[in-house]
Amino acid sequence: MHTYLSSPLGTLRITGDVSGVSAISCLDDPMPDLFLIRNLPAPLQQACDQLTDYFDGIRKDFTFLMSPIGTPFQQRVWEALLTVPFGQTRSYLSLARQLGDEKAIRAVAAANGRNPLAIVVPCHRVIGSDGSLTGYAGGLWRKQWLLEHEGSRRKANEGQLSLFAF
């Protein structure tokens, strides 16, 4: 079963059942007209409520049941992503080191890219070793927005001084 949530990133599609939320994805299409499901399974309703709180600046972490489907290695990477605190970032290399094998950096990056739970399993908090924004399945503009929302990146021209007085 799935439901939709309007957000600053566009429409979110939330998929799952009573055992947990299995996917959250950003859609470029607008929310379907008249889309309403009564009696959503509790994890889906909780995900909608908690994501709304996150976008409103009230929530920094998520507590609803999650049931992402992936290989054992992907599951390990996604668990490691949950350790990256709100408002902070990690490099792919540091994540690979955290998992015990810095040579697995490409596999870590691939698993990060296959994260089915956008936003709540914070793959957007993983950046290049040089601080650059690299890959995000939802688009780099969404990654930039999420990092700015969490305060881990300033807007491009925030804090810059003007050379001219107007």
Image (cartoon, rainbow, N blue to C red):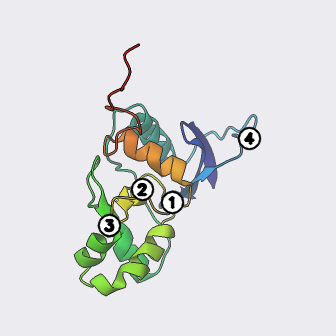
The span from disc 4 to disc 2 (Cα, nearest Å) is 26 Å
Q: Work out whether mark 4 precedes mark 3 in sequence or the reverse, and give the earlier one.
A: 4
Q: Work out whether mark 3 precedes mark 2 in sequence or the reverse, and give the earlier one.
A: 2
The span from disc 3 to disc 2 (Cα, nearest Å) is 14 Å
The span from disc 4 to disc 1 (Cα, nearest Å) is 24 Å
Q: Work out whether mark 1 precedes mark 3 in sequence or the reverse, and give the earlier one.
A: 3
Mark nearer the viewer, 4 or 3: 3
Whether residue 148 sits left or right of residue 43 in the image: it is: left
Mark nearer the viewer, 3 or 2: 3
Mark 4: give few (<14), some (14-19) or many (20+) Cα within 10 Å: few
* Helix, strand or loop under label 4: loop
- Residue at image position (70%, 40%) is 30
- Out of 110 and 4, give the one closest to the viewer: 110
Q: Position of residue 82 (x, y in %)?
A: 31, 60
Q: Are marks 1 and 2 in contact (CB under 8 Å)?
A: yes
Instruction: Give the labeled residue for mark 1.
Output: 136
Instruction: Give the labeled residue for mark 4.
Output: 32
Whether residue 149 sits left or right of residue 19 in the image: it is: left
- Out of 154 and 95, give the one closest to the viewer: 154
Instruction: Give the labeled residue for mark 2.
Output: 124
Mark 1: give few (<14), some (14-19) or many (20+) Cα within 10 Å: some
Mark nearer the viewer, 4 or 1: 1
- Residue at image position (39%, 74%) is 75
Q: Work out whether mark 4 precedes mark 2 in sequence or the reverse, and give the earlier one.
A: 4
Mark 3: give few (<14), some (14-19) or many (20+) Cα within 10 Å: few
Instruction: Give the labeled residue for mark 3.
Output: 129
Q: Position of residue 95 (x, y in %)?
A: 29, 71
Q: Work out whether mark 4 precedes mark 1 in sequence or the reverse, and give the earlier one.
A: 4
Q: Position of residue 156 (x, y in %)?
A: 41, 39
Q: Amino acid at mark 2?
A: His
